[in-house]
Image (cartoon, rainbow, N blue to C red):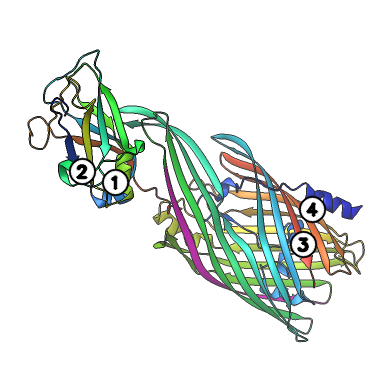
Amino acid sequence: VRRALVVLALAMMPAAVSAQSSQFGVRGLGMPGRPISARAFSSGGAFAMFDPLSSLNPAALGGLKSLTAGFAALQDFRHVENPAGSQSLRETRFPHLSVAGPIGQRPGVVGVSFSNYTSRDFTLASADTIPLRGVPVPVSDTFASRGGLSDLQAAGAYRFKDTWVVGGSFDVITGSARLSARRTFADTSYQASRQQSELSYAGIGVSLGVVRNFGPAFSVAATVRSDGHVNVDRDSARVDRIDLPYTFGLGVRWRVQPKLELAGQGVMRTWSAANSDLLAQGGTGADNTLELAFGGEYMPNPKRPGSGPIRFGARYGRLPFPLVPGEQPHEFGISAGTGLQFAQDRAGIDLGLEHVWRSAGAFSERTFLVNVGVTVRP
Amino acid sequence: VGGEPSSRALIRFGLSDAFLDSATVVRATLELLPARPILGLPTDPTLLDTRLVLGDIGAKSPVTVDPTFIQFDTLPAVQTDTVRVEVTRMVQAWQASRARPQSVFLTLRPEAASFTRAVFGSTRSPSIGAPRLRITYQRSFPFETP
Protein backbone atom coordinates (compact mmCIF):
# COMPACT_ATOMS: atom_id res chain seq x y z
CA VAL A 1 0.00 0.00 0.00
CA ARG A 2 2.82 2.34 0.89
CA ARG A 3 4.51 1.66 -2.44
CA ALA A 4 1.27 2.38 -4.26
CA LEU A 5 0.93 5.68 -2.44
CA VAL A 6 4.42 6.71 -3.49
CA VAL A 7 3.70 5.86 -7.13
CA LEU A 8 0.42 7.77 -6.91
CA ALA A 9 2.20 10.81 -5.49
CA LEU A 10 4.74 10.72 -8.34
CA ALA A 11 1.98 10.42 -10.92
CA MET A 12 0.28 13.51 -9.53
CA MET A 13 3.33 15.67 -10.25
CA PRO A 14 2.61 17.77 -13.34
CA ALA A 15 4.72 17.03 -16.38
CA ALA A 16 5.09 20.60 -17.54
CA VAL A 17 4.55 23.74 -15.56
CA SER A 18 5.42 27.37 -15.89
CA ALA A 19 8.65 28.27 -14.10
CA GLN A 20 8.06 30.89 -11.45
CA SER A 21 10.16 31.16 -8.34
CA SER A 22 9.36 33.02 -5.20
CA GLN A 23 8.73 36.74 -5.48
CA PHE A 24 11.43 37.11 -2.82
CA GLY A 25 13.99 35.98 -5.39
CA VAL A 26 13.41 38.89 -7.77
CA ARG A 27 16.10 41.15 -6.32
CA GLY A 28 19.79 40.56 -5.70
CA LEU A 29 21.11 37.20 -6.78
CA GLY A 30 17.76 35.48 -6.44
CA MET A 31 16.08 33.06 -4.09
CA PRO A 32 18.71 31.09 -2.15
CA GLY A 33 18.53 27.36 -2.67
CA ARG A 34 18.85 24.68 -0.01
CA PRO A 35 21.50 22.06 -0.83
CA ILE A 36 19.78 19.28 1.02
CA SER A 37 18.38 15.87 0.20
CA ALA A 38 14.73 14.92 0.37
CA ARG A 39 15.39 13.14 3.64
CA ALA A 40 16.82 16.26 5.30
CA PHE A 41 14.10 18.36 3.69
CA SER A 42 11.41 16.26 5.40
CA SER A 43 12.70 17.21 8.83
CA GLY A 44 12.93 20.95 8.13
CA GLY A 45 16.60 20.63 7.28
CA ALA A 46 17.45 19.76 10.88
CA PHE A 47 19.51 16.70 9.89
CA ALA A 48 21.28 18.40 6.98
CA MET A 49 24.54 18.86 8.89
CA PHE A 50 24.71 15.07 9.35
CA ASP A 51 23.19 13.97 6.06
CA PRO A 52 25.77 12.56 3.60
CA LEU A 53 23.50 13.24 0.64
CA SER A 54 23.18 16.92 1.52
CA SER A 55 25.91 19.39 0.62
CA LEU A 56 25.83 21.60 3.69
CA ASN A 57 28.60 19.96 5.68
CA PRO A 58 31.38 18.05 3.83
CA ALA A 59 32.18 16.05 6.97
CA ALA A 60 28.74 14.46 6.78
CA LEU A 61 30.04 12.39 3.86
CA GLY A 62 31.83 10.28 6.47
CA GLY A 63 28.54 8.59 7.25
CA LEU A 64 28.45 6.81 3.90
CA LYS A 65 29.31 3.11 3.83
CA SER A 66 28.84 2.48 0.11
CA LEU A 67 28.66 4.28 -3.21
CA THR A 68 25.39 6.23 -3.23
CA ALA A 69 23.69 8.50 -5.73
CA GLY A 70 20.87 10.81 -4.76
CA PHE A 71 18.55 12.94 -6.85
CA ALA A 72 15.84 15.31 -5.69
CA ALA A 73 12.92 16.92 -7.53
CA LEU A 74 10.96 19.74 -6.00
CA GLN A 75 7.44 20.77 -6.93
CA ASP A 76 6.23 24.09 -5.61
CA PHE A 77 2.59 25.24 -5.40
CA ARG A 78 2.44 28.86 -4.28
CA HIS A 79 -0.11 31.54 -3.58
CA VAL A 80 1.39 35.00 -3.81
CA GLU A 81 -0.01 38.27 -2.50
CA ASN A 82 1.46 41.71 -3.02
CA PRO A 83 0.24 45.27 -3.65
CA ALA A 84 -0.35 44.40 -7.33
CA GLY A 85 -2.79 41.60 -6.47
CA SER A 86 -2.69 37.89 -5.79
CA GLN A 87 -1.82 34.91 -7.96
CA SER A 88 -1.38 31.17 -7.73
CA LEU A 89 1.86 29.91 -9.23
CA ARG A 90 3.83 26.72 -9.44
CA GLU A 91 7.30 25.59 -10.31
CA THR A 92 9.32 22.44 -10.81
CA ARG A 93 12.99 22.31 -9.97
CA PHE A 94 15.73 19.78 -9.52
CA PRO A 95 17.54 21.36 -6.61
CA HIS A 96 20.04 18.69 -5.68
CA LEU A 97 22.04 15.85 -7.16
CA SER A 98 24.88 14.02 -5.44
CA VAL A 99 27.13 11.01 -5.92
CA ALA A 100 29.52 9.87 -3.21
CA GLY A 101 31.24 6.78 -1.97
CA PRO A 102 34.09 5.45 0.14
CA ILE A 103 37.64 5.11 -1.16
CA GLY A 104 38.22 1.38 -1.16
CA GLN A 105 38.62 0.06 2.36
CA ARG A 106 39.99 3.33 3.67
CA PRO A 107 38.02 5.50 6.09
CA GLY A 108 37.75 8.24 3.49
CA VAL A 109 34.75 9.24 1.40
CA VAL A 110 34.66 11.46 -1.67
CA GLY A 111 31.73 12.84 -3.57
CA VAL A 112 30.44 15.41 -5.99
CA SER A 113 27.17 17.25 -5.89
CA PHE A 114 25.26 19.75 -7.97
CA SER A 115 22.82 22.00 -6.20
CA ASN A 116 20.85 25.16 -6.65
CA TYR A 117 22.66 28.16 -5.13
CA THR A 118 20.13 30.82 -6.04
CA SER A 119 17.16 30.76 -8.35
CA ARG A 120 16.22 33.62 -10.66
CA ASP A 121 13.08 32.33 -12.37
CA PHE A 122 10.39 34.94 -12.50
CA THR A 123 8.18 36.99 -14.77
CA LEU A 124 6.95 40.41 -13.72
CA ALA A 125 4.21 42.35 -15.50
CA SER A 126 3.21 45.95 -14.98
CA ALA A 127 1.13 48.62 -16.69
CA ASP A 128 1.67 52.35 -16.85
CA THR A 129 0.97 55.45 -18.90
CA ILE A 130 3.90 57.45 -20.21
CA PRO A 131 4.06 60.64 -22.29
CA LEU A 132 5.32 60.06 -25.84
CA ARG A 133 5.54 62.97 -28.26
CA GLY A 134 3.42 64.97 -25.85
CA VAL A 135 0.60 62.42 -25.70
CA PRO A 136 -0.06 60.00 -22.81
CA VAL A 137 0.30 56.42 -24.10
CA PRO A 138 -0.63 53.34 -22.03
CA VAL A 139 2.13 50.73 -21.99
CA SER A 140 2.45 47.18 -20.69
CA ASP A 141 5.83 45.93 -19.51
CA THR A 142 7.00 42.38 -18.95
CA PHE A 143 10.32 41.52 -17.39
CA ALA A 144 11.34 37.87 -17.25
CA SER A 145 14.32 35.95 -15.98
CA ARG A 146 15.18 32.28 -16.35
CA GLY A 147 18.16 30.72 -14.63
CA GLY A 148 20.19 31.29 -11.53
CA LEU A 149 23.37 30.20 -9.82
CA SER A 150 24.39 26.62 -9.22
CA ASP A 151 26.96 25.08 -6.93
CA LEU A 152 29.14 22.29 -8.27
CA GLN A 153 30.86 20.78 -5.26
CA ALA A 154 33.67 18.27 -4.92
CA ALA A 155 34.03 17.12 -1.34
CA GLY A 156 35.89 14.63 0.78
CA ALA A 157 35.71 13.41 4.36
CA TYR A 158 37.92 11.30 6.57
CA ARG A 159 36.87 9.28 9.62
CA PHE A 160 39.10 9.09 12.65
CA LYS A 161 37.73 5.91 14.24
CA ASP A 162 34.06 6.53 14.93
CA THR A 163 34.63 9.65 16.96
CA TRP A 164 35.72 12.38 14.58
CA VAL A 165 34.95 13.04 10.97
CA VAL A 166 36.52 15.96 9.18
CA GLY A 167 35.77 17.09 5.67
CA GLY A 168 36.40 19.75 3.12
CA SER A 169 34.99 20.82 -0.18
CA PHE A 170 35.82 22.86 -3.23
CA ASP A 171 32.89 24.61 -4.86
CA VAL A 172 32.49 26.11 -8.29
CA ILE A 173 29.65 28.59 -8.34
CA THR A 174 28.41 29.06 -11.84
CA GLY A 175 25.27 29.70 -13.81
CA SER A 176 23.47 32.22 -15.91
CA ALA A 177 20.20 34.11 -16.10
CA ARG A 178 18.52 34.78 -19.42
CA LEU A 179 16.67 38.06 -19.11
CA SER A 180 14.17 39.74 -21.37
CA ALA A 181 12.24 42.98 -21.18
CA ARG A 182 9.21 43.53 -23.40
CA ARG A 183 7.08 46.64 -23.80
CA THR A 184 3.86 46.93 -25.76
CA PHE A 185 2.00 50.13 -26.51
CA ALA A 186 -1.74 50.72 -26.64
CA ASP A 187 -1.06 53.08 -29.57
CA THR A 188 -0.19 50.74 -32.43
CA SER A 189 1.89 53.45 -34.08
CA TYR A 190 4.56 52.35 -31.64
CA GLN A 191 6.04 48.93 -32.20
CA ALA A 192 6.42 46.50 -29.34
CA SER A 193 10.01 46.30 -28.19
CA ARG A 194 11.92 43.35 -26.81
CA GLN A 195 15.39 43.44 -25.33
CA GLN A 196 17.30 40.37 -24.25
CA SER A 197 20.47 39.76 -22.35
CA GLU A 198 22.29 37.02 -20.51
CA LEU A 199 24.02 37.44 -17.19
CA SER A 200 26.57 34.78 -16.39
CA TYR A 201 28.15 34.16 -13.01
CA ALA A 202 31.40 32.55 -11.91
CA GLY A 203 32.91 32.12 -8.48
CA ILE A 204 34.79 29.72 -6.26
CA GLY A 205 34.14 28.63 -2.71
CA VAL A 206 35.67 26.32 -0.11
CA SER A 207 34.31 24.81 3.05
CA LEU A 208 35.45 22.81 6.05
CA GLY A 209 33.35 20.68 8.32
CA VAL A 210 33.57 18.41 11.29
CA VAL A 211 31.31 15.88 12.99
CA ARG A 212 32.04 14.79 16.55
CA ASN A 213 30.28 11.68 17.78
CA PHE A 214 29.90 11.43 21.54
CA GLY A 215 28.94 7.80 21.51
CA PRO A 216 26.22 6.37 19.29
CA ALA A 217 23.48 8.62 20.63
CA PHE A 218 24.78 12.15 20.47
CA SER A 219 26.68 14.06 17.80
CA VAL A 220 27.67 17.62 17.10
CA ALA A 221 28.53 19.01 13.68
CA ALA A 222 29.97 22.30 12.56
CA THR A 223 30.89 23.81 9.23
CA VAL A 224 32.33 27.00 7.87
CA ARG A 225 32.33 28.02 4.26
CA SER A 226 33.69 30.93 2.25
CA ASP A 227 32.31 31.65 -1.20
CA GLY A 228 34.59 34.56 -1.98
CA HIS A 229 32.97 36.56 -4.72
CA VAL A 230 31.14 36.01 -7.95
CA ASN A 231 31.97 37.76 -11.20
CA VAL A 232 28.98 38.91 -13.20
CA ASP A 233 29.25 39.19 -16.99
CA ARG A 234 26.59 40.66 -19.20
CA ASP A 235 26.81 39.13 -22.65
CA SER A 236 30.50 38.31 -22.04
CA ALA A 237 31.40 41.79 -20.74
CA ARG A 238 32.29 42.11 -17.05
CA VAL A 239 29.75 44.35 -15.34
CA ASP A 240 30.05 43.55 -11.67
CA ARG A 241 31.76 41.64 -8.90
CA ILE A 242 29.64 40.72 -5.92
CA ASP A 243 31.00 39.46 -2.62
CA LEU A 244 29.40 36.23 -1.47
CA PRO A 245 28.79 35.24 2.13
CA TYR A 246 30.62 33.23 4.72
CA THR A 247 28.49 30.42 6.08
CA PHE A 248 28.67 29.19 9.66
CA GLY A 249 26.67 26.15 10.68
CA LEU A 250 26.23 24.24 13.91
CA GLY A 251 24.08 21.16 14.42
CA VAL A 252 23.32 18.61 17.10
CA ARG A 253 21.77 15.16 16.82
CA TRP A 254 20.42 13.13 19.68
CA ARG A 255 19.09 9.59 19.57
CA VAL A 256 16.50 9.75 22.31
CA GLN A 257 15.43 6.14 21.84
CA PRO A 258 16.45 3.50 19.33
CA LYS A 259 13.40 4.47 17.34
CA LEU A 260 13.52 8.24 17.74
CA GLU A 261 16.18 10.67 16.71
CA LEU A 262 16.02 14.44 17.14
CA ALA A 263 18.20 17.12 15.58
CA GLY A 264 18.56 20.84 15.43
CA GLN A 265 20.79 23.24 13.57
CA GLY A 266 21.50 26.87 12.97
CA VAL A 267 23.08 28.27 9.83
CA MET A 268 24.19 31.86 9.47
CA ARG A 269 25.23 33.45 6.20
CA THR A 270 26.89 36.86 6.00
CA TRP A 271 25.02 38.07 2.94
CA SER A 272 25.59 41.66 4.05
CA ALA A 273 28.99 41.25 2.37
CA ALA A 274 27.11 41.70 -0.90
CA ASN A 275 25.23 44.75 0.34
CA SER A 276 27.57 47.47 -0.92
CA ASP A 277 28.05 45.77 -4.30
CA LEU A 278 24.32 45.41 -4.87
CA LEU A 279 23.58 48.96 -3.76
CA ALA A 280 26.28 50.30 -6.07
CA GLN A 281 24.51 48.59 -8.99
CA GLY A 282 21.16 50.11 -8.05
CA GLY A 283 19.79 47.12 -6.12
CA THR A 284 18.11 47.03 -2.75
CA GLY A 285 21.06 45.53 -0.91
CA ALA A 286 21.43 42.38 1.15
CA ASP A 287 21.21 41.38 4.81
CA ASN A 288 22.69 38.58 6.87
CA THR A 289 20.52 35.52 7.25
CA LEU A 290 20.00 33.03 10.04
CA GLU A 291 18.14 29.78 9.61
CA LEU A 292 17.09 27.67 12.58
CA ALA A 293 15.69 24.19 12.15
CA PHE A 294 14.43 21.51 14.46
CA GLY A 295 13.19 18.09 13.53
CA GLY A 296 13.00 14.45 14.24
CA GLU A 297 12.83 11.02 12.69
CA TYR A 298 10.82 8.13 14.07
CA MET A 299 11.92 4.76 12.79
CA PRO A 300 9.43 1.91 13.30
CA ASN A 301 12.17 -0.56 12.44
CA PRO A 302 15.59 0.67 13.70
CA LYS A 303 17.32 -2.17 11.81
CA ARG A 304 16.07 -0.67 8.55
CA PRO A 305 15.97 3.08 9.31
CA GLY A 306 15.32 4.03 5.71
CA SER A 307 12.09 2.09 5.36
CA GLY A 308 8.94 3.74 6.57
CA PRO A 309 10.35 6.38 8.89
CA ILE A 310 8.19 9.28 9.95
CA ARG A 311 10.06 12.55 9.62
CA PHE A 312 8.92 15.91 10.88
CA GLY A 313 10.42 19.31 11.42
CA ALA A 314 10.07 23.07 11.48
CA ARG A 315 12.33 25.88 10.44
CA TYR A 316 12.53 29.63 10.57
CA GLY A 317 14.81 31.73 8.47
CA ARG A 318 15.44 35.14 7.00
CA LEU A 319 16.00 35.78 3.32
CA PRO A 320 18.88 37.94 2.14
CA PHE A 321 17.47 40.19 -0.56
CA PRO A 322 14.72 42.65 0.43
CA LEU A 323 12.13 43.70 -2.12
CA VAL A 324 11.84 47.04 -0.35
CA PRO A 325 14.93 48.47 1.39
CA GLY A 326 14.76 47.87 5.12
CA GLU A 327 12.15 45.09 4.99
CA GLN A 328 14.02 41.82 5.20
CA PRO A 329 11.82 38.87 4.20
CA HIS A 330 11.49 35.92 6.53
CA GLU A 331 9.98 32.47 6.22
CA PHE A 332 8.62 29.78 8.46
CA GLY A 333 7.98 26.21 7.41
CA ILE A 334 6.70 22.99 8.83
CA SER A 335 7.45 19.71 7.14
CA ALA A 336 6.86 16.01 7.23
CA GLY A 337 7.85 13.03 5.17
CA THR A 338 8.71 9.40 4.89
CA GLY A 339 10.73 7.03 2.77
CA LEU A 340 10.84 3.59 1.33
CA GLN A 341 13.77 1.35 0.52
CA PHE A 342 13.66 -1.69 -1.71
CA ALA A 343 15.83 -3.98 -3.84
CA GLN A 344 17.70 -5.09 -0.75
CA ASP A 345 18.14 -1.45 0.29
CA ARG A 346 19.93 -0.68 -2.97
CA ALA A 347 17.30 1.84 -3.98
CA GLY A 348 14.99 4.12 -2.13
CA ILE A 349 12.46 6.87 -2.49
CA ASP A 350 12.00 9.68 0.01
CA LEU A 351 8.98 11.93 0.00
CA GLY A 352 8.85 15.23 1.85
CA LEU A 353 6.11 17.81 2.18
CA GLU A 354 6.57 21.31 3.50
CA HIS A 355 4.26 24.25 4.03
CA VAL A 356 6.11 27.55 4.05
CA TRP A 357 4.91 31.05 4.88
CA ARG A 358 7.03 33.95 3.64
CA SER A 359 6.41 37.64 4.16
CA ALA A 360 7.95 41.09 4.15
CA GLY A 361 5.74 44.13 4.59
CA ALA A 362 2.95 44.08 2.01
CA PHE A 363 4.43 41.05 0.23
CA SER A 364 3.55 37.55 1.33
CA GLU A 365 3.17 34.05 -0.03
CA ARG A 366 2.16 30.59 1.09
CA THR A 367 3.95 27.69 -0.50
CA PHE A 368 3.33 24.00 -0.52
CA LEU A 369 6.45 22.07 -1.47
CA VAL A 370 6.66 18.45 -2.54
CA ASN A 371 10.15 16.99 -2.56
CA VAL A 372 10.78 13.57 -4.07
CA GLY A 373 14.20 12.06 -3.65
CA VAL A 374 15.56 8.95 -5.31
CA THR A 375 18.55 7.13 -3.85
CA VAL A 376 20.50 4.41 -5.64
CA ARG A 377 23.30 2.27 -4.25
CA PRO A 378 24.65 0.29 -7.22
CA VAL B 1 8.17 65.05 -56.09
CA GLY B 2 5.67 64.04 -58.76
CA GLY B 3 4.38 66.28 -61.52
CA GLU B 4 5.09 65.83 -65.17
CA PRO B 5 7.74 64.99 -66.16
CA SER B 6 7.83 63.15 -62.85
CA SER B 7 10.38 63.99 -60.16
CA ARG B 8 11.67 61.75 -57.43
CA ALA B 9 13.53 62.61 -54.27
CA LEU B 10 16.38 60.85 -52.51
CA ILE B 11 16.73 61.71 -48.83
CA ARG B 12 19.87 60.75 -46.94
CA PHE B 13 20.31 60.61 -43.19
CA GLY B 14 23.32 60.11 -40.97
CA LEU B 15 22.41 58.40 -37.74
CA SER B 16 25.44 57.59 -35.64
CA ASP B 17 26.64 54.03 -35.08
CA ALA B 18 26.45 54.61 -31.33
CA PHE B 19 22.75 55.32 -31.61
CA LEU B 20 22.00 52.49 -34.01
CA ASP B 21 23.92 50.00 -31.86
CA SER B 22 22.35 50.83 -28.53
CA ALA B 23 18.82 52.09 -29.08
CA THR B 24 15.64 50.11 -29.61
CA VAL B 25 13.57 52.09 -32.08
CA VAL B 26 9.84 51.84 -31.42
CA ARG B 27 8.69 54.56 -33.79
CA ALA B 28 10.31 56.65 -36.51
CA THR B 29 8.44 59.29 -38.43
CA LEU B 30 9.72 61.07 -41.52
CA GLU B 31 8.55 64.69 -41.44
CA LEU B 32 8.53 66.65 -44.68
CA LEU B 33 7.84 70.37 -44.73
CA PRO B 34 6.00 71.55 -47.89
CA ALA B 35 7.56 74.55 -49.56
CA ARG B 36 4.09 75.49 -50.73
CA PRO B 37 0.61 73.95 -50.49
CA ILE B 38 0.42 70.62 -52.27
CA LEU B 39 -2.55 70.78 -54.58
CA GLY B 40 -4.33 67.83 -56.10
CA LEU B 41 -7.74 66.83 -57.38
CA PRO B 42 -10.31 65.32 -55.01
CA THR B 43 -11.24 62.79 -57.67
CA ASP B 44 -7.65 61.95 -58.57
CA PRO B 45 -6.00 60.76 -55.34
CA THR B 46 -2.23 60.63 -55.20
CA LEU B 47 -0.09 58.34 -53.08
CA LEU B 48 3.19 59.42 -51.52
CA ASP B 49 5.43 56.36 -51.85
CA THR B 50 8.43 56.01 -49.52
CA ARG B 51 10.88 53.15 -50.11
CA LEU B 52 14.04 51.88 -48.55
CA VAL B 53 17.11 52.37 -50.74
CA LEU B 54 19.15 49.20 -51.19
CA GLY B 55 22.29 50.87 -52.51
CA ASP B 56 22.88 54.58 -52.71
CA ILE B 57 24.29 55.34 -56.15
CA GLY B 58 22.42 58.57 -56.61
CA ALA B 59 19.40 59.11 -58.80
CA LYS B 60 19.46 55.57 -60.17
CA SER B 61 19.65 53.89 -56.76
CA PRO B 62 17.88 50.53 -56.54
CA VAL B 63 14.98 50.52 -54.12
CA THR B 64 13.31 47.70 -52.26
CA VAL B 65 10.31 45.80 -53.52
CA ASP B 66 9.75 44.21 -50.11
CA PRO B 67 6.40 45.58 -48.86
CA THR B 68 7.79 45.55 -45.32
CA PHE B 69 10.00 48.48 -46.25
CA ILE B 70 7.55 50.37 -48.43
CA GLN B 71 5.27 52.96 -46.91
CA PHE B 72 2.63 54.86 -48.83
CA ASP B 73 -0.21 57.13 -47.89
CA THR B 74 -2.79 59.13 -49.78
CA LEU B 75 -2.20 62.86 -49.97
CA PRO B 76 -5.28 65.02 -49.41
CA ALA B 77 -6.47 67.31 -52.17
CA VAL B 78 -4.85 70.24 -50.40
CA GLN B 79 -1.96 69.61 -48.08
CA THR B 80 -0.43 72.57 -46.30
CA ASP B 81 0.70 70.96 -43.06
CA THR B 82 3.78 68.82 -42.47
CA VAL B 83 3.64 65.47 -44.27
CA ARG B 84 4.38 62.60 -41.90
CA VAL B 85 5.38 59.11 -42.99
CA GLU B 86 5.99 56.23 -40.58
CA VAL B 87 9.36 54.70 -41.42
CA THR B 88 10.00 52.61 -38.31
CA ARG B 89 10.80 49.46 -40.27
CA MET B 90 13.27 51.30 -42.47
CA VAL B 91 15.20 52.70 -39.51
CA GLN B 92 15.22 49.22 -37.96
CA ALA B 93 16.66 47.94 -41.24
CA TRP B 94 19.46 50.49 -40.94
CA GLN B 95 20.13 49.13 -37.47
CA ALA B 96 20.29 45.58 -38.76
CA SER B 97 22.94 46.31 -41.39
CA ARG B 98 25.45 49.15 -41.52
CA ALA B 99 26.08 48.35 -45.20
CA ARG B 100 22.59 49.52 -46.03
CA PRO B 101 22.50 53.24 -46.87
CA GLN B 102 20.47 55.45 -44.57
CA SER B 103 18.42 56.72 -47.48
CA VAL B 104 14.82 56.68 -48.64
CA PHE B 105 13.28 57.35 -52.02
CA LEU B 106 10.13 59.41 -52.44
CA THR B 107 7.81 59.17 -55.42
CA LEU B 108 4.21 60.06 -56.14
CA ARG B 109 1.88 57.43 -57.55
CA PRO B 110 0.57 57.22 -60.16
CA GLU B 111 3.86 58.51 -61.43
CA ALA B 112 3.69 61.07 -64.26
CA ALA B 113 -0.05 60.61 -64.38
CA SER B 114 -1.40 63.04 -61.81
CA PHE B 115 -1.66 66.76 -61.40
CA THR B 116 -0.10 66.73 -57.96
CA ARG B 117 3.42 68.01 -57.49
CA ALA B 118 4.89 68.23 -54.03
CA VAL B 119 7.85 70.46 -53.20
CA PHE B 120 9.47 69.87 -49.83
CA GLY B 121 12.16 71.73 -48.01
CA SER B 122 15.67 70.31 -48.11
CA THR B 123 19.13 71.08 -46.85
CA ARG B 124 19.41 73.31 -49.87
CA SER B 125 16.49 75.40 -48.66
CA PRO B 126 17.20 76.02 -44.99
CA SER B 127 14.52 78.71 -44.76
CA ILE B 128 11.82 76.05 -45.19
CA GLY B 129 13.44 73.30 -43.18
CA ALA B 130 15.04 70.03 -44.15
CA PRO B 131 13.29 66.67 -43.90
CA ARG B 132 13.75 65.22 -40.47
CA LEU B 133 13.36 61.93 -38.67
CA ARG B 134 11.48 61.96 -35.41
CA ILE B 135 12.57 58.85 -33.55
CA THR B 136 11.10 57.43 -30.37
CA TYR B 137 13.44 54.87 -28.87
CA GLN B 138 14.31 52.95 -25.76
CA ARG B 139 17.73 52.86 -24.23
CA SER B 140 19.35 49.57 -23.33
CA PHE B 141 17.54 47.96 -20.39
CA PRO B 142 19.68 47.89 -17.22
CA PHE B 143 19.61 44.10 -16.91
CA GLU B 144 22.65 44.13 -14.66
CA THR B 145 20.83 46.02 -11.91
CA PRO B 146 20.32 43.37 -9.22
All told, the count of numbered labels is 4
Q: Are marks 2 and 1 on the same chain?
A: yes
Q: In the shown orientation, is residue A326 left or right of residue A135?
A: right
Q: Which mark is residue A374?
A: 3
Label 4 or label 3, whichever lies nearer to me, is 3
- In this figure, which residue is indicated by the disc labeled 1? B94
Kind of residue at badge 2: Ser
Q: Secondary structure at mark 1?
A: helix
* Crowd band around label 3 with a 10 angstrom C-alpha radius: few (<14), some (14–19), many (20+): many
Alpha carbon separation for disc pair 2 and 1: 16 Å
Asked whether the residues under marks 1 and 4 belong to the same chain, the reply is no
- Mark 1 or 4, which is nearer the eye? 1
Looking at the picture, tell me which residue is in the foreground, B88 or A8: B88
Asked which secondary structure carries label 3, the reply is strand
Are labels 1 and 3 on one chain? no
Identify the residue under disc 2. Answer: B61
Instruction: Tell which subunit mark 4 falls on.
Output: A
The stretch in magenta equals: A194-215
Can I make out residue B57 in this image?
yes
Q: Chain letter of disc 1?
A: B
- Could you tell me the amino acid type at mark 3? Val
Distance CA(mark 4)–CA(mark 2) = 75 Å
Spatial CA distance of label 2 from label 3 is 68 Å
